[in-house]
């Protein structure tokens, strides 16, 4: 009798039931992939004459029924060994062991599970890519409306130089286009078939994996059966891409969070994306941004948790890697989709206060760098000499509580120790934020002229990425249709 | 129209509904804590005359009904602002705003949420402690049966010196007793009341937090209202304790996993804790151990994920910390309970092959250290000189394919370059694993004599920990009973 | 010949030299601890007559010389097996194997290394505690000057209610006092002696570990020799405490970073803690705060890295745990000291703009919660009814671009739909930030009256913590003195 | 006066000196990259006539001197603002502000630092790729010798089916070839020039970034100046690739560690890669494998630490990201190189006991799956029916303590309940490990025939990867040569 007041065996059974039993439930979500694989496997086994046509056809009829009716086409599923053996058990009950028992010829749950997870990953990553493309489109769309929306650009959260809102939006979009590339690369690495590798050692049945790959829409076959059942680096690569993406989103949300403060006041959010207080009547909390920042941690850490589960395990089929390490995989991808969609909603919904943005940029000394450059170009100062002169002017001015709009030619002359002969309107012009952004057209700066070019290029890149992803998604879907057609065609002969 | 083919507003609403709406569902699990807090808060508000007795009594009647009937006592709960405002809305609908609207006087969702999470943590940690004590009891129980079960002790997974199975079991138990202490310390740090801190700035209503603390069974009141709503370090401290515990379990499982291999063959597991193969008929996979090793990663990483969510947030009430960072808290504690229970089941269920253990220890040279010590004590060698002599003997012997049982006095003489005059039976004796463990009685070694003393001490420590936890649990329960009684007593006056 | 164009053996030797050789260098930093342990061990071995007095005395003379002269008292140290064997080799070279070879009697590098790391941890944690106490003192000191410095309190970075700067400073101090408690707990867990546990199995020499513990100032002896060499949870517990502390510092720095922006403008930093730009003449970047935020990640992740290295290792003496997992330990503690010192410098050096703080709090509607409470107290509204009324007033006002100072009794009457008969000066008073903080004296709020009490209590707590740490440090130092005296006394007999 | 007994200012200066001062030292390692960039920048500024030819030439002469003489060509470097301003200061001291002060025209430390880190990453990743290719070559080389070395293949560390050592070696090599692809992808993403983006907003000087890119050997120019200074995802992508690689190495090391145990006894390590004990004379600890397993945690966690530092920072130039988050970058890459080299040394140095491997595979029932398949092919059983029959045979046999070599046709008949008429030699043959591996030629199994084909393909892939990396490295080197030549040519005109 243990602490729990049960006999040992009862305690053991209770714990095992609780911890092993959940496997069946969680695997039920992958029934479609399992059934598709079974269809392809049986067609291949029939063609290679590893199983007899009659047996194969009886199986195919049932598999097509499962495809049509789903889980209800199977009897009671139970046990602690997961979906496949419960599924096979149901087939054996219905079709007899000579038919139902033939399905698993020349394979194992190891290569089966590896194949299911790759098919599942393919779908999950495409859903994520869809969301990412939506956000990128939204950023580009918003940027088009803000090509000339002048705002303060910050470094270290200190006013640096004027930029445009479009410039910030396109910086985020640039990062997301690299995230897209990383996710597509992960998808590409996922596209290799482990089926046929069986337990870890392949088989002595003369199977035709290239036929199975073709039926299931895989572009490649893994050439080492041990690697095929042991490796899950396509999954960790996917999670790394999610983590990097989530980090960028947390950074973008941090900018927005600061800009949303009462003190900056650069934009408001629609009621659906903000929240009130239960006690303070005046509150409009940027809940959407806080969720973005906080929840990104989950997408950022799933990679590490997965690696940690895989650390110091055998490079083979082991439960630690093939089930435990991937326990958080789906939730990491779903959280990443949520983050992307939430940022998409924020970008769509943000209501920008252009006047506030522009007026801040006019007074906070963010324009003095171009005044410095003017001295280099027009008054023959070296850059550092000009910089020191302007620095002195700014220090004197701020000590007197002046804004940048208060700077005068005289102050420059005083600092220079000689008349620089700069007309007042030139100083005004140099310090004008709008003129600043129009001048900042080199080095990929915010100038509207450059920005418009970039916008077109980005829209094209987006289209290219959409086409690439549509091609993959289309192939997956048409393949599936073709697989079912072939199965139907065989049984209808 | 966005990528999703919806207007912006529809997309925004859909995303907000999906991401904000889940809050209500997840908070429903904490209804009991919320209702208890409301009871205590209303009693305090009534006693301090902040709200009128009539209003208070009407509220208490309803709160007692909710306590009795649960969520069904509330009408339709809905909205994106979580449980409390839905709950209050339901009260206002039923009792009118003058009564229902009085419940939230002198508090906020911020201190309320902080208090709920501390009460929740208290319960979760006690459940975990219960499981840990069960495992410790099981280890001590098993150790009692294996005080004299000789086995090879390994360092670096190489045979080192003989120990007993009890020695290993008690090493794990020692680590777990420190984990217990860390969890109790975290529980202690959790035991401080934030209620009354309101949004972040306390209140100008003359509340009596010490009365509320007393009614809710909190031992302390937090003395800074900003800290009270901002800090969640009791929760991260709890997760750190779980992570350290899970690491130890992963290490214990690693020892067992290696000992379970066909090549070591030290024990078997009951069918409930192992698994077969779908293809290889001979398989008995140690699934329980693989789950332990793999799933420990989840308990190990939840701390980091939580900190990451809290990083670079305001030290105040923010969604990132108070909701997002704690999203994985429950699952981390549940996973830790699962790990502890699973190790408990493994320890209970393992079937030890004592003969195999003993026979391996006899042949694998793990006993030569005591032969070395013999030369120090009886032949006047310094330790290093004796070590070098025996090292040479072992090298020669292993090159000839000998086992440690094959060593002879002659071999020692040959290495020494002189007759050491050690009788053959002395060499036998020195190399006997059982004699080894009986001699290893200093420095907390495995000697059965020392082990028996320790077992008694550990049993006492366990009792002490059980008493401490029972006291806390008892206080929580009796407090709750007392709270309900007081509420009933007030309304029945 | 390998890719590197070397024969295999050369490549192997080069890699081994590079990776194993660094051990000696890194262990040299712990020479003092090693030598102290050797002194204590030899005294104990002499007293228990495990080694002869003459041998012991010869060793003690040399050990005292090493204590006096340091590493120079040893000859050339080399090899890939770390400090101890090099050190012993040097002793054997000088004193002969009969003396030098006796030092390692009844112990192993395993218990030795475990003991050294605990002594090292003791020192490192005390250095960190010293820095933490310094920061806490600085916070309390600064708070004393700002008990009445009104500022906006934020939740979600939105104006919430007025607080004082002292209130924020004391919130951080409260968190740090819990960090102190956690570090002291870790120090306490470190205070147990592993020496005598030898390789993993204790010894058959009749050693007296309690004597060694006494000589080395350890309060406890570990009672299981396997646990003693396998466990490092005192170290991971220490790292968890550092991680939690660093998270709090990152949060405090985040508040300060936002307050430092041009738009908030609440304080400036001295030149030593800020940085300029190489291009933008106006820049004053808060580099100290960015370092604090960024570098905290290192202190936050060292725990996880350490656990990861320990995952799935044998619960025994293994290189993964005892060396590899602790590779980042020192740097994590040093980084934490840096973070604490840097925050200390920031708190000391920040130059607060009280007027700016006060003027912002006056206009940003952060005072309307107390106006709401007024309606509850004086106009018989339930809290929720009053809240709804004020919410409507604020919404109307902000739509008209009003500040909170613009609110009038008429606006309240309009929202109420009836005359509330609130004098204009009462509305002014309710909306006055200074009056707000004076009223917020319940629920641990910012009221100067409450704050002053708390300040005294915190100063006392700080003194208590200082005394506790001084006691530990004093004991460590006096113990060391006593150890050396005893050794000197023995050899001078 | 603070706790440290210093005035505030002294304490502040001391902390700032300690924490800011280290920047200069750490940046000195990148002097070559800085100087190369300066050369390219000046040539571009001269060609675009942004600075005068005379000024440019004076600068180029000095820069070429720095290239030749290194850091000694610069005067005293000091200050808390890092290498660049110290370097520029030295130039101004020597050449005057009109020349030295012109170097920084049309750029900032922000784009400069971003460019330096990309050039640095390029070098570091190529060093790592070099090591990875070396390990892959070693694995292929070793595999060629072990195409027919039969050993037990394990799943869950239980005997599964026979494989060959080559099969395992090639599984690891397959994973490493994907790691190579990920590192090359990261290298590709690194190959984009940020220079010209200046602080964050580009410039109004008419610079020619494509010319600079050409001079520095960058293939692409970043098209958004904010993204250019803010983004470091090429670096995190690199760290993710290292983490995935390190995880695989930890898994390979785990297999080897278990195989190295006394109980498995599959191979030995050369003395250089193993270690002894200071107390136990018989020890041969696999230190190399333990370092591999333990230290992999550092490479695995650097990604997470880096992301954590970047979390919730502004998407702009900030110290948290651009300096703090990358503090562990170099050490992560160096550790990864160490791990790869150490595994390379282990693979080169391992001395395999083929007989032990083969004899274990013969007795541990790992061959019964092919016996099962035989029943399917030759006795018309469905797979599941055959499996159940063999499972029963194995259970009966193991209960009697039989090895797989003891199985007889009679046992099969008994289980089948009818004579199966299988000749004894057929049973022998089916259960022979060597025959097993020869048959396992489908599904990418271990059959030597398949393995030989794969070996050739892998050797080709390796050559292709070597060529790709050589091309990149060659381009980097020849570019640098070209850059220096152009500079020399200009100044010698």
Image (spheres, coloured by chain):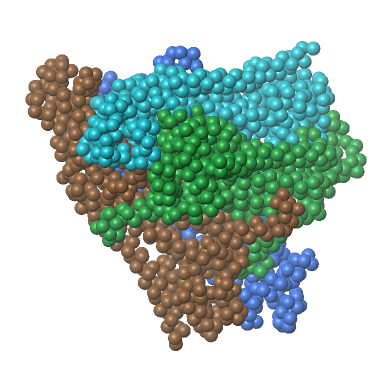
Chain colours: A green, B brown, C blue, D cyan
Residue found 64% across the figure and 70% down from its top: C369
The reply, left or right, for residue A331 in relation to residue D316 is left
Residue lying at the far bottom of the rendered structure:
B493
Residue A473 higher or lower than D190, as above or below: below
- Name the foreground residue: A217 vs D257: A217
Residue A269 higher or lower than A188, as above or below: below
Residue found 48% across the figure and 26% down from its top: D173
Dividing the picture into quadrants, the one containing residue C8 is: top left
Residue found 22% across the figure and 25% down from its top: B387
Dividing the picture into quadrants, the one containing residue C74 is: top left
Dividing the picture into quadrants, the one containing residue A124 is: top right
The reply, left or right, for residue D163 in relation to residue D134 is left
Image spot of residue A324 (x, y percent):
44, 45
* Image label count: 0
Quadrant where the N terminus of chain A sits is bottom left
- Name the foreground residue: D139 vs C268: D139
Image spot of residue D218 (x, y percent):
69, 26
Quadrant where the C terminus of chain A sits is top right
Residue A340 higher or lower than A379, as above or below: below
Residue lying at the far front of the rendered structure:
A493
- Name the foreground residue: B320 vs C24: B320
Image spot of residue B90 (x, y percent):
57, 75
Residue A472 visible to an observer of this rendering: yes
The reply, left or right, for residue C155 in relation to residue C248 is right
Image spot of residue C252 (x, y percent):
57, 52
Residue D22 visible to an observer of this rendering: no
Residue found 25% across the figure and 26% down from its top: D282
The reply, left or right, for residue B452 in relation to residue C5 is left
């Amino acid at each position: 009798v243990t602490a729990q007041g049960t006999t040992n065996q009862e305690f053991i059974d209770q714990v095992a039931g609780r911890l092993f039993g959940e496997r069946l439930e969680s695997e039920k979500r992958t029934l479609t992939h399992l059934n598709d694989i079974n269809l392809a496997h049986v067609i291949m086994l029939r063609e290679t004459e590893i199983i007899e046509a009659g047996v194969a056809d009886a199986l195919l009829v049932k598999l097509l029924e499962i495809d049509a009716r789903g889980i209800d086409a199977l009897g009671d599923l139970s046990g602690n060994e997961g979906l496949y053996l419960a599924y096979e058990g149901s087939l054996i009950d219905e079709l007899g062991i000579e038919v139902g028992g033939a399905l698993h010829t020349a394979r194992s749950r190891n290569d089966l599970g590896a194949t299911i997870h790759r098919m599942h990953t393919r779908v999950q990553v495409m859903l994520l890519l869809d969301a990412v493309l939506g956000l990128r489109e939204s950023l580009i769309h918003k940027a088009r409306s803000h090509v000339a929306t002048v705002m303060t650009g910050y470094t270290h959260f200190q006013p640096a130089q004027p930029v445009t809102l479009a410039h910030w939006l396109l910086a985020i979009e640039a990062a997301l286009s690299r995230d897209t590339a990383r996710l597509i690369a992960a998808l590409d690495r996922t596209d290799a078939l482990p089926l046929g590798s069986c337990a870890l050692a392949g088989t002595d049945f003369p199977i035709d994996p290239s036929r199975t790959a073709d039926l299931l829409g895989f572009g490649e076959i893994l050439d080492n059966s041990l690697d095929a059942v042991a490796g899950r680096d396509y999954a960790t690569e996917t999670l790394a891409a999610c983590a990097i993406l989530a980090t960028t989103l947390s950074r973008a949300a941090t900018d927005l969070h600061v800009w949303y403060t009462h003190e900056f006041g650069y934009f408001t959010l629609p009621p659906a994306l903000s929240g009130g207080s239960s006690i303070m009547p005046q509150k409009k909390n940027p809940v959407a941004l806080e969720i973005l920042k906080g929840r990104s941690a989950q997408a950022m850490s799933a990679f590490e948790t997965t690696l940690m589960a895989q650390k110091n395990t055998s490079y083979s089929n082991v439960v630690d890697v093939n089930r435990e390490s991937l326990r958080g995989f789906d939730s990491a991808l779903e959280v990443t989709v949520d983050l992307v969609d939430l940022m998409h909603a924020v970008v769509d919904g943000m209501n920008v206060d252009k006047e506030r943005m522009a007026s801040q940029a006019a007074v906070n000394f963010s324009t003095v760098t171009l005044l410095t450059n003017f001295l280099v170009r027009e008054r023959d100062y070296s850059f550092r000499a000009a910089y020191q002169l302007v620095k002195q002017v700014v220090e004197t001015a701020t000590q007197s509580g002046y804004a940048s709009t208060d700077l005068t030619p005289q102050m420059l002359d005083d600092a220079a120790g000689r008349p620089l002969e700069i007309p007042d309107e030139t100083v005004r012009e140099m310090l004008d934020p709008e003129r600043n952004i129009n001048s900042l057209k080199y080095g990929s700066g915010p100038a509207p002229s450059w920005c418009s070019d970039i916008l077109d290029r980005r829209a094209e890149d987006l289209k290219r990425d959409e086409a690439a992803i549509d091609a993959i998604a289309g192939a997956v879907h048409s393949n599936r249709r073709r697989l079912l057609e072939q199965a139907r065609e065989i049984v209808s002969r």
